[in-house]
Amino acid sequence: MTALCSICMGIIFGNLNAVFTNLPANFGWPREELVHRISLASLALHLPQALTSFGLAKYFQDYSRNKIQIISNILIIIGTVFTVLENFPLFLVGYGILGLANGMMIPNSAKYIRELAPPEISGRLGSITKTGVGVGLLLTFTLSVFLPTDPEQRTSLVKIMFLLPIVLALI
């Protein structure tokens, strides 16, 4: 479960970076506003993630890890749906929701490993989260290399890449 959540986080992080040069064509964004919009999308993802992970982690201590996982998976599904819409403000809302979900998953993953792993290997198992994020990033960057050059086909495949976290959230 922790590894899948981490891969999901990596895919969410990687999608924005791996396909950012195609976002103007895929979502109808003006090319001259690309850097500004990518910066806003990164802020919309990472700010809620940091606030949730660091600021609200103590409030989630009373919830079971399964309940937190279910809530974050629901948020991933909702946020991912918003990211494939061609409306930029809704895209930002989607990334904000994904940031909240990621911020919930990060401390939850550490708590999950600490509870289940024997003390002598819990430190080594703590690297599962980082490894999963790396695998998710690698997956999105690898998939972006094989995207077709035809803009019609590319647009639909990029949207499928943005929908990949839903698959992992449902598992």
Image (cartoon, rainbow, N blue to C red):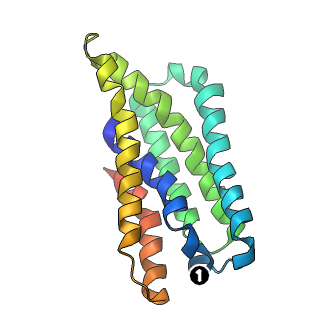
User: Is 7 or 138 nearer to us in this picture?
Assistant: 138
Q: Amino acid at mark 1?
A: Ala
Up-down relation of residue 30 to residue 44 (above or below)? below
Placement of the N terminus among the 4 image quadrants: top left
Residue 43 shows in this picture: yes
Q: Residue at x 29, y 10 (%)?
A: 119
| Mark 1, secondary structure of its residue | helix
- The percent position of residue 121, horizontal first and vertical second, equals 26, 16
Name the residue beneath numbered marker 1.
25
Up-down relation of residue 54 to residue 118 (above or below)? below
**Residue ranking furthest to the top:** 119
User: Is 141 or 122 nearer to us in this picture?
Assistant: 141
Q: Residues within 10 Å of mark 1 (few under 14, many from 20)?
A: some
Query: Viewed as shown, does residue 44 lie left or right of 130?
Result: right
Q: Residue at x 33, y 33 (%)?
A: 128
- The percent position of residue 126, horizontal first and vertical second, equals 36, 25
- The percent position of residue 69, horizontal first and vertical second, equals 42, 37
Query: Viewed as shown, does residue 161 lie left or right of 118?
Result: right
Q: Residue at x 44, y 33 (%)?
A: 67
Residue 1 shows in this picture: no
Query: Viewed as shown, does residue 134 lie left or right of 55?
Result: left
Q: Quadrant of residue 100?
A: top right
Q: Residue at x 39, y 82 (%)?
A: 148
User: Is 84 or 25 nearer to us in this picture?
Assistant: 25
- The percent position of residue 27, horizontal first and vertical second, equals 60, 77
Up-down relation of residue 76 to residue 127 (above or below)? below
What is the tally of numbered marks visible in this picture? 1
Q: Quadrant of residue 23?
A: bottom right
